[in-house]
Image: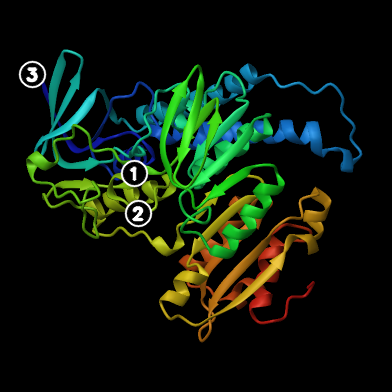
Amino acid sequence: MTTDSFDLVVIGAGPGGYVAAIRAAQLGLKVACVEEESRLGGTCLRVGCIPSKALLESSQRYHEVKDALTPHGVKVQGVELDLPMMQKRKDEVVKSLTSGVASLFKKHEIARYDGHGSVASAGVVAVKSGDNAQELRARWILIATGSKPAQLKGVECDGDIVGSSTEALAYSKTPEHLVVIGGGYIGLELGSVWKRLGAKVTVIEYLDRILPGMDAELSRDALKTFKKQGLEFRLGTAVTGVRTDAGQAVVECRDSEPVTADRVLVAVGRVPNTDGLGLAEVGVQISERGFVVVDEHYQTSVPGIYAVGDVIGGAMLAHKAEDEGIACVENLVTGYGHVNYDAVPGIVYTHPEIATVGQSEEALEAAGVKYRKGIFYFKANGRARALGETDGWVKILADEQTDRVLGVHIIGPRAGDLIAEAAVAIEFGASSEDIARSTHAHPTLAEVVREAAFAVQGRAIHA
């Protein structure tokens, strides 16, 4: 068995792992990364964030050309869906980005090991690929193995009729009826894709609301929007099982009629991927929910072994994993690394987009924090009028005494881009007046953010 030595060995080449590896190499460390998939980039690049956004973009363009250009004076006839071409484009986007990560590894001289990585002991990573096995010795080990789709009791995914987001990204034809179990980010995004492409879509959610954890007002208006788009919802409904018969799925629900569909997407969240890592065997503490327990510097209960990303819990977002990976390795080398979790945005890439950062009204009320609220609507914005995208609003929550921005919530055109300004404002401790006093170009959608900041003080200009 061969043995190679490194300063840092990263297990997992998703956003947390590959970004940490690159940053560590920039800081002068000798770095290796172990990944069992042939393509780098993790779930996000291969079967998550990137392919879903490619399909969201393509399906929205199809919908616009087919149904939404007439108000712009554009008449189109004979529009056809070429789903194989759409899927091919998605795959090409994924291929280009995963190849880009491989190029970055070469640029930064990061050693890549193909195979399943596990922790043999503190300072030793075992790599197994088929019949081949070797050991990597490291001063530090970083676990960045991400997450996998959660399973629902009583529902068995067969990878065909009943599947996870992985299967829903690769349907070869549009389902006649798609049932989505789960009203969170993943379910709403992929439900939107297939609704635009012609499917009947029914979303079944156990809670009495969609987008659990987000601001309640945002959730309520999002639900109204999705209903207008033709998505059907069964809220407060528990799925007790799914059975298949003659190419159809029957979704059994407690206290309500079953739903029959030709495809079922199970999107009830994600769970940490710690299978076969050997963590418990070497003494790494695992929580009751299966997450790796870490301290403020991302070190586990075993000195020299660290973990970041979905595997440690919190918001399961690629950009959060990236920030944690950077903070972890910077702390190892420089003694300082930090992530401000109040400034980590979350985005739902539906149409309109939904974006949030910081605290919701419900969280502030529960904590007894007094705040002021400013809200402004896209329908009063010139750029939104020109785009023909006037649904939605921006809401800013600011501390009643200090005016410091505590939370920003957006539903509307390009909300995912607009939220960046709010994240920066929270990171730097800005007040709503700071945003209001900063010049925003006209005409732009960003003016809605500024008007919401004015509205905190009760003085929105165009209200």
Q: Residue at x 23, y 46 (%)?
A: 290
In the displayed orientation, state which residue is furthest to the top. Answer: 131
Residue 117 position by quadrant = top left
Picture layout, residue 124 above or below residue 441: above
For numbered disc 1, what is the local secondary structure? helix
| 400, 306: nearer the viewer | 400
Q: Quadrant of the N terminus?
A: top left
Q: Is residue 407 left or right of residue 287?
A: right
Marks 3 & 2, CB-CB < 8 Å contact? no
Q: Earlier in the sequence, mark 2 or mark 1?
A: 1
On the image, numbered disc 3 is attached to which residue? 1
Residue 55 position by quadrant = top right
Residue 391 percent coordinates (x, y): 73, 55
Measure the C-alpha gap from mark 2 to mark 1. Answer: 22 Å
Measure the C-alpha gap from mark 3 to mark 1. Answer: 30 Å
Q: Is residue 451 left or right of residue 116?
A: right
- Label 3 packing within 10 angstroms: few (<14), some (14-19), many (20+): few
For numbered disc 2, what is the local secondary structure? loop
Amino acid bearing label 1: Arg
- Label 1 packing within 10 angstroms: few (<14), some (14-19), many (20+): some
On the image, numbered disc 2 is attached to which residue? 314
Q: Is residue 283 left or right of residue 441?
A: left
Marks 2 & 1, CB-CB < 8 Å contact? no
Q: Quadrant of the C terminus?
A: bottom right
Residue 191 position by quadrant = top right
On the image, numbered disc 1 is attached to which residue? 23
